[in-house]
Image (tube, helix red, strand yellow):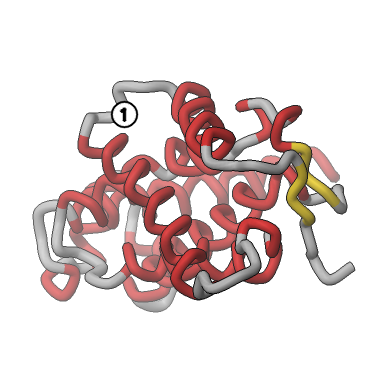
């Protein structure tokens, strides 16, 4: 019985992923408001019945894509310190940094938001998410003194997204691991301490 359920679950995931990829691909060449359910199912090579098993409107697909991306972005950013109270920067290696694995996983989505006018403002939303993570989780990235904590958190978040944009614009020439190595090298180069506290409200 469990094998049958697993098969059905995998089939559902496969169908939903096909519909999501179809919508993202269509949004590269058409305005969202012009895309129809017929367009989506034809591109995904599925039937309308399959669409309506999972979604009521095309907007539901887009909402789920955005939820998938933002949830995975947060989890990926927190990966190096999710089970730790402190992050030892000098001991941190590129395998622990998962932000670029996240971007690579959702490469079509990031290509869409960087190369088209679709989802206007989503780039800022990503930077806002990163900024909030820095402000709430990694307080030691914000030094004491006269530096405005909001501004330095924005500096770090937009710097990371700048690397993401460069990577996307370059056609993902580099591997996720190489991008992680470069980010770590940049961060370590500007640090005069070895430990950053990680506060997850535990």
Up the image or down, 88 lies above or below 116; here it is above
- Quadrant of the frame with the N terminus: top right
Q: Quadrant of residue 2?
A: top right
Task: Please state if 152 lies on the left or on the right of 76 as rendered.
Answer: left
Q: Which residue is mark 1?
A: 172
Q: Is residue 24 visible?
A: yes
For the point 78% across and 55% down, the residue is 197
Task: Please state if 84 lies on the left or on the right of 103 as rendered.
Answer: right
Up the image or down, 126 lies above or below 189; here it is below
Closer to the camera, 118 or 192? 192
Up the image or down, 175 lies above or below 113; here it is above
Category of crowding for the residue at label 1, using alpha-carbon neighbours closer than 10 angstroms: few (below 14), some (14–19), many (at least 20): some
Return the x and y of residue 7 as percentages of the image width and height.
Answer: 68, 41
Up the image or down, 15 lies above or below 117; here it is above
Q: Is residue 53 visible?
A: no
For the point 21% across and 62% down, the residue is 38
Return the x and y of residue 48 as percentages of the image width and height.
Answer: 33, 62
Closer to the camera, 153 or 119? 153
Task: Please state if 175 lies on the left or on the right of 99 as rendered.
Answer: left
Closer to the camera, 8 or 24? 24
Q: Secondary structure at mark 1?
A: loop
């Amino acid at each position: 019985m469990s094998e049958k359920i697993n098969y059905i679950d995998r089939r559902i995931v496969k169908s939903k992923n096909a519909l999501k990829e179809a919508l993202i691909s269509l949004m590269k060449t058409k305005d969202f408001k012009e895309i129809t359910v017929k367009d989506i199912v034809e591109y995904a090579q599925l039937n309308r019945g399959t669409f309506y098993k999972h979604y009521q409107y095309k907007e539901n697909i887009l909402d789920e894509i955005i939820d998938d991306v933002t949830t995975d972005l947060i989890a990926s950013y927190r990966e190096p310190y999710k089970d730790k109270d402190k992050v030892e920067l000098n001991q941190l290696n590129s395998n622990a940094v998962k932000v670029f694995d996240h971007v690579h996983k959702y490469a079509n989505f990031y290509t869409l938001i960087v190369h088209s006018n679709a989802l206007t403002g989503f780039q800022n939303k990503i930077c806002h998410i990163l900024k909030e993570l820095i402000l709430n989780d990694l307080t030691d990235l914000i030094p004491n003194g006269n530096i405005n904590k909001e501004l330095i958190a924005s500096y770090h978040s937009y710097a990371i997204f700048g690397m993401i944009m460069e990577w996307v614009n370059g056609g993902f020439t580099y591997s996720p691991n190489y991008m992680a190595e470069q980010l770590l090298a940049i961060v370590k180069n500007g640090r005069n301490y070895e430990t950053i506290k990680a506060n997850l409200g535990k």
